[in-house]
């Protein structure tokens, strides 16, 4: 059965700036939704900030196995109630893939519990993304590394919890490194943070980038255990004197 | 140099209920602050919910290396502004030890990013706390396990991120298990969650419990790296064409 | 494409003791190979100690995606050359599922780097296996826990490296706990240790046990990254002065 | 009480090659043993390959809290019986710090269970070592990063188990990255792998390098839990019907 994917994008840069529209004429969300279908069987839809409830109604989320998130300048405009809804849905089992500047989204910060801050520079660094966990399914089809000729630099210290699994580390021309591919389990949900994707570069047309996102979608969309039940509970074994 | 410890307690049960006051006449906070001094050189103070700013002023937090937290029925009465202040201070490097029902405190949930929910039962289960990481300094001076004759049961599934290090697992008479001693790094701060300590039992008079809290205080009060600097940054190496 | 599974069993107890043969007339290996097919599409074969090269020829291993291992009294009779061959094959990408007394097998100890020692007791304890990571695909189809009416007890301290992911923790009647479901990445291979399965109990006829082994086989048989290349390497970027 | 440190060095390059003797006239072991005393109270001794039992008698190991290991061309000449002795002592609680080319030592490979292979190049790359876990005591006194003007390059994929804690990541001029500071618990012992230290560079005269080794020694020399007891064990709670 195909994994049901919703690609969310604030969809602001592409509308406001011609040079970015030239790279992503239908928006970053459409580029990703179309692009990953070359690397797996996915049933994709998209959602954006401007839609009612940001396109993330209860009905949409209930029918989403994996949510992909791209945001940047519009983080503050995402309503807290929707963030809470996504948060609950992730803990209940929906996969979440957070891309690039999504590191500062409300949903990622809420799930991580830290500032998710980092160092950055827009100067056209080359990025070389190294696989450090070749056993990981997210690294499928990638060689020892792949390169992005120009990207925004993100550098350590990246203020996140130590990832459950570290899949990629980036090298940048200007001298920095970055933990670029990080997995987390939170509640019943699986989360993957993937670094690349500045809006001024054609990163989401890159084959390796799309393949990683597709791999991560498959990983995050895997089955899982039962939804936990919490609260007061009766003893399963006799308690002496009771 | 002695580690500067602030023991925070909502201090409600001990005031409101005679049977609990009989166990902790000066409050849980005082029992802990006094008790851990048998197991290390600590400079302790206490703070409670009823004090202005809950006793957690900027000045107090700036002079606290490790904050110990006990709360239960008063979680909702802790002001968000104080929670944010403690959160920032932990990320900036203060250690935090969260005890028992503190699993549901605002500060712990904010740092974990999950519900921190669990199963529970007040029926006098015996708790046997097993050391699963004997290399850990928090396990110093404890044998293979120790027992608490009667405790509230907390059972899995405990909705927390997988701990960076799992030090203790509890066995309960009624048939449950629990990850009872969990460490985390968050930002520049170190966090330890320790399960035991229901207010109706003399748990904080138990030698092993006090020793674990003292060990954890030492662990969380260790030195650390530099406070990270975030934001826009210049290249450290030449970027061709720039 | 079906995952190609080889179930290895020393196949000694079932031959030597009638009461065990009564439980596993065709051996533990056959019970597992047959049983997991109810929970997934697997192409299974079996191999045993008495076969030439213990049934683990280069050809067999090259055509095995996941190897399942059950051993106990015959550990020392497994030839080192075969252990080395399996070790290399795991690091090169074959999945490995180690069951019960396989904790003391040469291959598991070699991969873990520790003694893999533990506490044990054959006294018919009830075992209750709790899911502590409901996001994990290995927990699919299992409730909050499942029970085995009688099993050999294994208790902490279990001398293994902290697992990459801890999926299950066991509770035992006699008062012990155990990390019962542990995942590891080693090289390009994925490893799962699963506790239950003493030869005197019908554990490998239990639906939940078989389902976990099937889930773990799927998890360990997932795709992975490229086989790493090691050794001397040329610079990818200019080194000033060279 | 001062931590008792034994610095082990194969001590071959410094004897055989004048240019290396010029950097380390009394050997790498002496440079380290002398150097770390500027950063803590340590009781140091040294041991080398040529000594009887490589200087690692039972008596020496029994009186060593932390063993520091530098080896390269002499790995194969280290006797297996001594490796086994060190292995047992680590599992029993001795700290171990493995430096640079020690990644290929018998003891490190035995403890890791993997090949510990990597990419390398001797071409005078600059190495910039970034702190990725500022909460860690091993990062004390180091800024956001530090630089070594020239070092041998070690690049990923580094075939090790995912570290329990990742403290440092290195950037190299030639385009590679490396997990340079890795902690592990094995048995009752704490292990730290630290990358820098090629024999042709004055790395062990660098203040930051010495400080990291001193910090790691303190970390690895911390107290720990009780030595586990393994094997057959009586039930701690009644087992019905027994």
Image (cartoon, coloured by chain):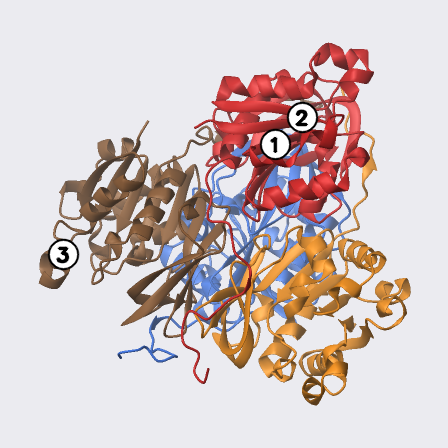
Chain colours: A orange, B red, C blue, D brown
- Left or right of residue D39: residue A54: right
Mark 3: secondary structure: helix
Look at the image and tell me whether residue D200 can be seen: yes
**Which image quadrant: the N terminus of chain A?**
bottom right
First in sequence: mark 2 vs mark 1: 2
| Distance (Cα) linking label 3 and label 2 | 59 Å
| Distance (Cα) linking label 3 and label 1 | 54 Å
Mark 1: secondary structure: helix
Look at the image and tell me whether residue C56 can be seen: no
Q: Which residue is mark 1?
A: B60
Q: Which residue is mark 3?
A: D14
Q: Is residue B107 above or below residue D59?
A: below
Residue positioned 89% across, 62% down in the render: A58
Q: Residues within 10 Å of mark 2 (few under 14, many from 20)?
A: many
Q: Are marks 2 and 1 in contact (CB under 8 Å)?
A: yes
Is disc 3 in the same subunit as disc 1? no
Q: Are marks 3 and 2 in contact (CB under 8 Å)?
A: no
Q: Residues within 10 Å of mark 1 (few under 14, many from 20)?
A: few
Task: State the residue lying farthest toward the bottom.
Answer: A22
Q: Which residue is mark 2?
A: B47
Mark 2: secondary structure: strand
The percent coordinates of residue D80 (x first, y second) are 26, 48
Residue positioned 45% across, 53% down in the render: C111
Is disc 2 in the same subunit as disc 1? yes
Q: Is residue B148 above or below residue A182?
A: above
Please tell me whether mark 2 or mark 1 is closer to you in this view: 1
């Amino acid at each position: 059965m195909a994994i049901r994917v919703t690609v969310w994008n604030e969809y602001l840069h592409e509308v406001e700036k011609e040079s970015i529209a030239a790279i992503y004429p239908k928006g970053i969300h459409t580029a990703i939704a179309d692009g990953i279908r070359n690397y797996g069987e996915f049933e994709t839809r998209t959602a954006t900030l401007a839609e009612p409830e940001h396109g993330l109604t209860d009905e949409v989320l209930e029918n989403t196995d994996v949510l992909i998130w791209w945001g940047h300048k519009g983080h503050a405009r995402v309503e807290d109630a929707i963030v809470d809804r996504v948060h609950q849905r992730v803990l209940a089992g929906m996969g979440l893939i957070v891309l690039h500047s999504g590191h500062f989204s409300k949903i990622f910060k809420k799930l991580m519990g830290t500032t998710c801050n980092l160092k950055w520079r827009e100067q056209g660094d080359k990025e070389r993304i190294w696989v450090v966990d070749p056993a990981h399914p997210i690294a499928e089809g990638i060689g020892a590394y792949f390169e992005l000729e120009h990207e925004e630099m993100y550098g350590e210290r990246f203020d996140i919890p130590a990832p459950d699994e570290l899949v990629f580390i980036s090298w940048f021309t200007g001298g920095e490194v970055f933990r670029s591919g990080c997995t987390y389990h939170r509640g019943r949900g699986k989360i993957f943070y993937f670094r690349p994707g500045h809006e001024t570069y054609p990163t989401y047309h890159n084959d390796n980038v799309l393949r990683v996102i597709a791999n991560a979608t498959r990983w995050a969309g895997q089955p899982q255990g039962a939804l936990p039940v919490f609260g007061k509970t009766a003893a399963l074994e006799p308690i002496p004197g009771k």
